Image: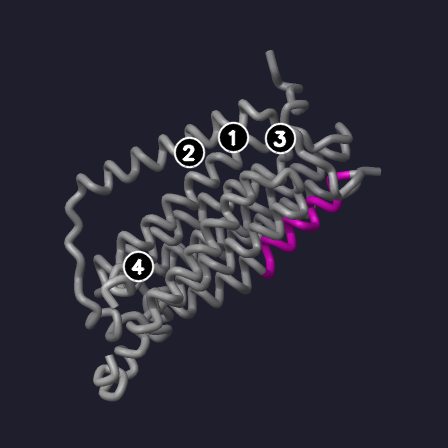
Amino acid sequence: MFTTLAAGTETDSLAQVAPFLYLIFAAITILSAWMIVISQNIVRMAMYLLFTLGGVAGLYFLMSAEFLAAIQLIVYAGGTLILIVFGVMLTSKNPFIRLQSMLWERCVAIGLGLLLAMLMIIALANTPIKQTGTEAVAQNHDIHTLAITMLSKYLVPFEVAAVLLLVVMIGAAFMARRRA
Amino acid sequence: MTMLALFQPGLYHLLAVSIALLTAGVAVILTKRNAVGILMGVELILNAAGLNFVAFNRYVWANAVDGQMFTLFIIVLAAAEAAVALAIFLNFYNNFDTINVDQADELQG
C-alpha cells in the first residue's frame, strides 16, 4: 500500500481515488433519479433532476470525457433545467402543487421498471463484450481529437444541428407567444 | 483493497448506473400526470443513453471519440426538444388552463 503510494504515478493515484469517486457519483445519480419517481412535488423533482445531471457529469469526468462533463453542466444543468423550472413556474397556479398519482399506478410503474432492468441485465449477461485497454484512452480522448472529429467526420451533423437549433428557436418563440 | 478493486469503475459499473437511470425515467413517464414531469423522465432516459455511449466509447472502442460525439448531439437534441415541448405545454396551458396530460383529450375519438 505505502510502496504504491510512494512510487505511484499520476495514473496510479487516479486509480486509487476512482472507486470512491465512482461510488459517490453513482449514488448521487441513482438516488436522485429514483427520488424523482417518488417525489410528488414538481419543484423538488426539478431539484433532484439537477443532482442527477450533476452526478452524470461527474461520471463523465471519471471516464476522462472532461469536455462532455463541462457541456453537460453548462447546457443541461444550466440551460435545459432552467427552461424546465421556468416551464413549471409558467404552467401552474401554485408552484407547490401536489401531483397525485395513485398507489397502484406507482406500484405498476416501479414493477415495470424493475422488469425492464431485469431484461437488460439478462441481455447484458448474455452478451460477450471485448474490452480494450486504457492506453488508447490516454492517446485519443482529448479535446483536440474531439474538435478534429467534430469538424471533419461529423461536420454535416454539426451543421444540421445548427439549423435545427435555429428552427427550434423560431418555432418555440412562435408557439409560445401570447395571442392577441 | 480488494473491496476497492471491486468498485474500480469499468464498463459494467457505468452500465449499471445507466440501467438505473433508464428505469427511473420509464417509471417517471408512467406515473407523472404533469407534462413537465414527463419531460423530466425523457431527460433521464436521454442521460442514460448518453452515459451508455460514453461508457462504450471509453471501455470498448477507445480508438476514436465517436461515442462522445453522439453524446454531444444527444445533449443538443435534448435542449431543442425541451424548448419545443415547453412551448407546446405553454400553449396548451393558455388554451385549457391545465397542464395535466389526462385532460389533453381533444383528439380522442
Residue B100: x %, y % from top left? 67, 29
Q: Quadrant of the C terminus of chain B?
A: top right
For the residues beneath circles 4 and 1, the answer to whether they share a chain is: yes
Give the mark nearer the N terminus: 3 vs 4.
3
Q: Quadrant of the N terminus of chain B?
A: bottom left
Residue under the point 21% across and 85% down: A3
- The alpha-carbon separation of the residues under discs 2 and 1 comes to 9 Å
> What residue is pinned by disc 2?
A113
Residue under the point 63% across and 45% down: A171
- Res. A6 image quadrant: bottom left
Q: Tag 4, which chain?
A: B
Between residues A175 and B57, which one lies in front from this camera angle?
B57
Q: Is label 2 or label 3 in front? A: 2
Q: Is label 4 or label 2 in front? A: 2
Q: Give the residue type at disc 4.
A: Asp
Magenta range is A78-92
Q: Is label 4 or label 1 in front? A: 1
Q: Tag 2, which chain?
A: A
- The alpha-carbon separation of the residues under discs 3 and 1 comes to 8 Å
Residue A164: x %, y % from top left? 51, 50
Is mark 2 in CB contact (under 8 Å) with mark 1?
yes
Helix, strand or loop at label 2? It is helix
Helix, strand or loop at label 3? It is loop
Residue B66's label in the rendered image is 4
> What residue is pinned by disc 3?
B33
Is mark 3 in CB contact (under 8 Å) with mark 4?
no
Is mark 4 in CB contact (under 8 Å) with mark 1?
no
**10 Å neighbourhood of mark 2: few (<14), some, or many (≥20)?**
many
> What residue is pinned by disc 1?
B30
